[in-house]
Image: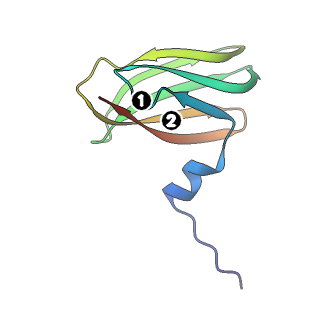
Amino acid sequence: MGNSTVGLQDYATEDKSFTIYPNPNDGQFTITFEAVLSNIEVNIIDVHGRLIHSSQYQNTDNINLKINQPAGVYFIEVETPGGITIKSLLKN
């Protein structure tokens, strides 16, 4: 028997196929992928679990977004053909 645990932190850091920058930021940020992807869904979730933004993109490797919400921590959920990854973002 192996010693295996799966949690949000482990899951969220597995996929390194995209970068969010700058982080922290003033609400404007960019998501850059290692390659052009055919189908991408981006959801922005606040610390209370509320979905504050959802959008879909086709055939891109670069997405510019803006959070029009108060300063705080937000979760960027990115779904690609390879799976779902969640990374945190700090808005100043």
Q: CA distance from mark 1 to mark 2?
A: 6 Å
Which residue is at 52% across, 14% downward? 64
**Local crowd size for mark 1, using a 10 Å CA cut-off: few (<14), some (14–19), many (≥20):** many
- Which callout, 1 or 2, points at the residue further toward the start of the chain? 1
Asked if residue 14 lies left or right of residue 27, the reply is right
Which residue is at 57% across, 64% downward? 6
Looking at the picture, tell me which residue is in the foreground, 68 or 79. Answer: 68
Classify 57 as above or below 4: above
Instruction: Name the quadrant of the N terminus.
Output: bottom right
Which residue is at 46% across, 16% downward? 65
Amino acid type assigned to the residue bearing label 2 in the image: Glu
**Residue 42 coordinates in the image, percent (x, y):** 52, 26
Q: Name the residue tied to disc 2.
A: 77
Colouring method of the image: rainbow
Residue ranking furthest to the right: 35
Classify 54 as above or below 59: below
Amino acid type assigned to the residue bearing label 1 in the image: Ile
User: Disc 2 on helix, strand or loop?
Assistant: strand
Q: How many marks?
A: 2
Looking at the picture, tell me which residue is in the foreground, 16 or 81. Answer: 16
CB atoms of marks 1 and 2 within 8 Å: yes
Residue ranking furthest to the left: 70
**Residue 25 coordinates in the image, percent (x, y):** 38, 25
| Image disc number at residue 31 | none
**Residue 34 coordinates in the image, percent (x, y):** 73, 28
**Residue 51 coordinates in the image, percent (x, y):** 36, 31
